[in-house]
Image (cartoon, rainbow, N blue to C red):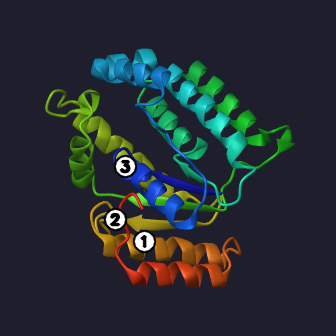
Amino acid sequence: MIYILGSIGAGKTSLTKVLSADMEAPAYYEDVEGNGMIANMLQKFYGAGADSRKRTGAMLQIAFLTFRYQQLKKAVTQENAIMDSSLESDFVMASQLHKHGEIDDIDYNVYVTLSQEMQSNVNGSPWNGLPDLAVYLKIDPDHELDEIQSRGRDMEDIRQKPELVAYYRRVNAAYQDWAKGYTRSSMITIDRDRYDFMHSAADRATVLDQIESKLVDLGKLSPQTFEALQAKHAAGPISKFA
C-alpha cells in the first residue's frame, strides 16, 4: 500500500491520479466534493475561523476517520493500492487541532482510541496500519497558499477569509514536524517547490521514477516492470491525468 501525504493543497490528489494510472493500481481518493457529509461539515468547519473549528473540529475528524477506515478495508486487499491521504495524515490534522485548543481533551482521547482500534483491525485481522511506502509532499507555505487559491474552493479562499492564512501555515508546519520524526514505515519526500508535477510532464516522469524505484527496493515492484515503466516515461510526455 502507498500513502500520498502532505498538507492542504500539496498536490496529493493529483499525484495519486498520475501514479495510479501509471502503475495501473487502484486508488482511493479523499473526494471532498463527492462526499456530501464531509463537504457539508467542511463548510461549517471553515465558516467562522477558530470558533467554527472548535465547534466542528472533533466531529469532522471522526467523519474523516470513518470514511478513511471504509476505504482502508478495501485497499488492504489490493496490491499497491494508493491512498490519497490516510489515517496517518488524519492524525496529524487532529493533533494540531488539539494542540491549538480546537479539539478538547475528552474528544481527542475518543478520537485517538477510535483511530488506534481502526488501524489494528481491518476485515477482522490484526494489521499495523502502516503503508509499504509513504510519499510525503513537502511544500513551501507561500507556494501552498497559491495552490489552495488555484483550486477555487470558496470555503478555503484567503481573499474572503484572510485569517485562514495563519491556519494553513500552522497545518503546513505540523506536517513538516511530523515528517521529520516519521520512522514507522519507509518514506520518500518529494519537494513540490522543485518538482512541478502538476504542470510539467518532465517533472511528472522524474517523480514517478523516484517513487517506483523505491518500490523496487522494497520488493513491491519487479525490476522488469520498473524498466517497462521507465521506457514508457522516456517515450513521450506523461499527461497530468494520464
Mark 2 in CB contact with mark 3 (< 8 angstroms): no
> Picture coordinates of residue 12 (x, y %)?
43, 52
Front residue of 163/74: it is: 74
Mark 1: secondary structure: helix
Could one spot residue 103 in this view of the protein?
no
Q: Is residue 161 left or right of residue 211?
A: left
> Picture coordinates of residue 116 (x, y %)?
71, 37
Q: What's the residue at 21%, 52% (across, down)?
A: 142
Q: Residues within 10 Å of mark 1 (few under 14, many from 20)?
A: many
Mark 1 belongs to which amino acid? Val
Q: What's the residue at 34%, 42% (across, down)?
A: 170
Q: Is residue 29 above or below residue 59?
A: below
Mark 2 in CB contact with mark 1 (< 8 angstroms): yes
Mark 2: secondary structure: loop
| Residue, disc 3 | 173
Q: Quadrant of residue 158?
A: top left
Could one spot residue 2 in this view of the protein?
yes
Mark 2 belongs to which amino acid? Phe
How far apart, in angstroms, are the residues tagged by discs 3 and 1? Answer: 23 Å
* Residue at the left extreme, as displayed: 159
**Quarter of the C terminus within the rendering:** bottom left
| Residue, disc 2 | 197
| Residue, disc 1 | 207
> Picture coordinates of residue 107 (x, y %)?
58, 20
